[in-house]
Image (tube, rainbow, N blue to C red):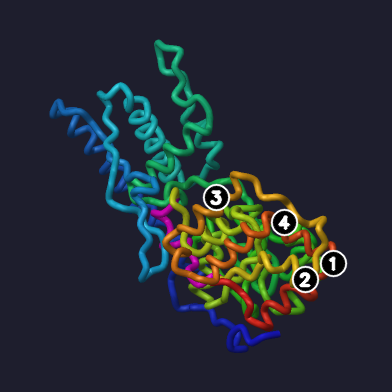
């Protein structure tokens, strides 16, 4: 194995109130008080406007490409200052205005009760038919979820701070012991299924108790993660294995950020050789346009792309059977990614995308199975780590 880091075991910051299990209740209480204050201020502003016979409104920062900037010094995406005013007495905005206030009230109830709800649960909590009409507050969850994100950015409060969580989608195994809501989780003893990464991975919920791992290997899908786990790759190479079921949800991205930031672990990404694998890497590394307001706590600018690469078809002597022809949509997406500000000046990434387009086909990590069932765990990744052969 290459020397990924010093062999010294990462130390826990036991004196920090953010990582000490006994302090989590205090952290949560203080956080809840601040969030409630923000919701109250929103309500008071609406009431004040109403009493003054002015049109009540909520200003929502715009989650668009045009309002997203790449901070070169921090190497992350950040949200700009443009906002859309959502007025009550504007027919095109009235419903969303009322939905925003309704969800804010629901979050206030959750925080005061000290309980949490899923996104689905929040939809049902806020769902009812408006008295005297046939109009429902929400037609379906696809309508309530974006409004909740609007509420997050308008309050400057994260979803977790509003006591709302998403479904679990992600797995971890390896040389680390976690504390989850007071329960000790030894990720070395999670069997074939691993430990399901929760939606909320804040220090008040998840603490790091013991870690011997030298790096984190994040893979795109559970199918590949299962191969690494079954082959005990994490034990042989002293690491942590994670997966995010495709594009990793917030909980997985937040955990990766914390593992890198608090424990100093390098993050290596094993993803498909296609525009979507490249995009997943971009989201892990710089953040996403839709959630640019959370990049500071979720992006990992130092994350490395270990593969699979366009040259691997020849380098690994793969058969024609693994080729998946690029569609017009794939080609357009690849060209868009090549123009991202954080990729445009990186010649290795430009060459990678150009070679994939020149090949005319894409490949999945699973294609390496055609060499041998364990080729990816016993040869491909160990060689890339040894040679430090990755894209940044």
Residue located beneath label 4 in the image: 222
The magenta stretch is 291-303
- Confirm or deny contact between disc 4 and disc 3 (CB under 8 A): no
* Measured Cα–Cα span from mark 4 to mark 1: 20 Å
Q: Earlier in the sequence, mark 2 or mark 3?
A: 2
Magenta span includes 115: no
Eyeballing the image, is 148 above or below 368?
above
Q: Earlier in the sequence, mark 2 or mark 1?
A: 2
Residue density around tag 2, few if under 14, some if 14–19, many if 20 or more, within 10 Å = few
Tag nearer the camera, 4 or 2: 2
Foreground mark, 4 or 1, reads: 1
- Disc 2 to disc 1: CB gap under 8 Å: yes
Q: Secondary structure at mark 3?
A: helix
Q: Give the Cα distance between marks 2 and 3.
A: 26 Å
Question: Where does label 2 land, which residue?
Answer: 316
Which class describes the residues within 10 Å of circle 4: few (<14), some (14-19), or many (20+)?
Answer: some
Q: Which mark is residue 371?
A: 1
Q: Is residue 150 above or below residue 222?
A: above
**Which residue is nearer to you in this view: 55 or 364?**
364
Q: Going from the N terminus, do you reach mark 1 or mark 3 first?
A: 3
In the picture of the structure, the residue carrying the numbered disc 3 is 333
- The local secondary structure at tag 4 comes to helix
In the rendered structure, does residue 293 fall within the stretch colored magenta? yes
Q: Nearer the viewer, residue 263 or 18?
A: 263
Which residue is painted at 51% across and 56% down in the image? 337
Q: Residue at x 56, y 76 (%)?
A: 265
């Amino acid at each position: 194995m290459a020397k990924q880091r010093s062999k010294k075991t990462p130390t826990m910051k036991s004196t920090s109130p953010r990582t000490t299990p006994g302090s989590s209740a205090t952290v949560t209480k203080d956080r809840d008080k601040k969030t409630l204050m923000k919701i109250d201020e929103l309500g008071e502003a609406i009431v004040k406007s109403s009493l003054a016979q002015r049109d009540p409104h909520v200003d929502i920062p715009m989650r668009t490409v045009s309002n997203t900037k790449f901070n070169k010094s921090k190497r992350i995406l950040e949200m700009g200052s443009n906002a859309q005013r959502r007025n009550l007495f504007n027919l095109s905005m009235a419903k969303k205005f009322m939905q925003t206030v309704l969800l804010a009230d629901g979050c206030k109830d959750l925080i005061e009760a000290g309980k949490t709800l899923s996104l689905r649960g929040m939809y049902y909590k806020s769902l009812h038919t408006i008295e005297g009409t046939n109009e429902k507050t929400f037609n379906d969850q696809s309508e309530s979820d974006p409004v909740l994100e609007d509420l997050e950015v308008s309050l400057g409060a994260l979803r977790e701070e509003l006591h709302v969580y998403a479904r679990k989608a992600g797995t971890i195994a390896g040389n680390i012991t976690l504390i989850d809501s007071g329960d000790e989780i030894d990720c070395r003893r999670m069997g074939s299924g691993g430990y399901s990464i929760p939606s909320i991975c804040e220090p008040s919920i998840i603490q790091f108790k013991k870690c011997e791992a030298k790096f984190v290997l994040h893979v795109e899908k559970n199918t590949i993660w299962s191969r690494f786990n079954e082959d005990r790759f994490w034990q042989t190479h002293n690491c942590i294995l994670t997966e995010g079921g495709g594009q990793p949800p917030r909980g997985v991205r937040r955990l990766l950020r914390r593992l890198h930031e608090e424990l100093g672990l390098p993050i290596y990404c094993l993803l498909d050789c296609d525009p979507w694998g490249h995009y997943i890497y971009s989201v892990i590394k710089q953040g996403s346009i839709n959630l640019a307001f959370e990049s500071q706590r979720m992006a990992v600018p130092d994350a490395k792309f270990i593969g699979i690469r366009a040259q691997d078809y020849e380098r690994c002597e793969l058969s024609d059977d693994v080729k998946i022809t690029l569609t017009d949509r794939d080609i357009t997406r690849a060209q868009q990614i090549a123009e991202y500000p954080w990729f445009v000046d990186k010649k290795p990434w430009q060459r990678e995308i150009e070679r994939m387009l020149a090949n005319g086909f894409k490949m999945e990590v699973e294609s390496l199975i055609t060499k041998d069932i364990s080729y990816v765990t016993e040869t491909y990744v160990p060689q890339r780590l040894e040679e430090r052969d990755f894209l940044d």
